Amino acid sequence: MMYDRIGALPASRTDFVLESIKEAILYGKLKPGQALVETDLAATLNVSKTPVREALKTLAGSGLVVMSPYKGAAVRTVDAEMARSVYDVRLLLEPEALRRAAALGADFAEARSALDDTEDLARRNRANRRFHRALYAGCGNPLMVQILDGLRDQTALITAAGWGVSPTWEAEDAEHRAILVAAEEGFGDAAADLLRRHVQTFADRVAEELPDVVR
């Protein structure tokens, strides 16, 4: 097995392959820049090449894989340009989504649950995804949620790269708890401001530490 699954089993073989490769990328089993050879992945996962090929196309669409007509597929390498682009959109939408969720009295129980799921780095990265989604999921605007959901995989890849250079998750955990308290108490503006600073601080640090552009 390429990685140890945590959570519900995928609904189909195609989903299984997609989730297997995705988690192997997000949690370091497949390294940035590593070639993704269909025959090797198929053998590892004990499937044909067809679901592997479809999974790689899907992952290319979500920004985790790059496809080249000459070199084939490879794990995307995170650079400062990518990080700035992703976090620019998050800074525009995520604090406002949280402000609205708090104003609507959204349930943040999932966010609180995610704070304690920190057994190892893989779980911590997964919990970070859960936490941030739980903050904006109740904003009342399905399109806003959809846009932010579309950035989750790339955000997780950037987060893993940032933590690989400098493990700052303890400070970020304290920031998460302050954001959540404000949101749970209905202080939407304060929660949004705390979240904006939290995201901006991480984005600035990662952009300084990563290479400018990887081609």
Image (tube, rainbow, N blue to C red):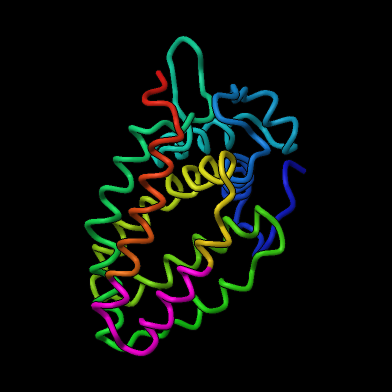
**Magenta span has 44?**
no
Q: How many marks?
A: 0
Residue drawn where x is 36% and y is 57% of the image: 199
Image quarter (top left, top right, bottom left or bottom right) of the C terminus:
top left
Front one among 176 and 30: 176
Q: Residue 168's spot in the image, x, y percent?
A: 55, 53
| 68 horizontally vs 43: left or right | left
Residue 156 position within the rendered picture, expressed as x and y whole percent measured from the top left: 49, 49
- Rendered image quadrant of residue 115: bottom right
* Vertical side of 71 occupied by 171: above or below: below
Q: Residue at x 23, y 68 (%)?
A: 96
Q: Is residue 202 left or right of residue 11?
A: left
Task: Tell me, yes or no, if residue 52 can be seen here.
Answer: yes
Q: Viewer-proximal residue, 154 or 51?
A: 154
On whether residue 190 falls in the magenta region, the answer is yes
Q: Which secondary structure is most common in the magenta stretch?
A: helix
Left or right position of 64 against 48? left
Please say if 14 is above or below 66.
below
**Residue 22: in sight, yes or no?**
no
Q: Position of residue 56 (x, y in %)?
A: 51, 33
- Which residues are the magenta region? 174-192
In the rendered image, the residue lying farthest to the top is 70
Quadrant where the N terminus is found in the figure: top right
Q: Residue 55 appears at what percent x and percent y?
A: 52, 38
Q: Tell me the residue at 51%/43% (across/down).
A: 162
The residue positioned 52% from the left and 62% from the top of the image is: 171
Q: Which of the 4 quarters of the picture holds residue 95?
A: bottom left
* Front position in the image: 1 or 135: 135
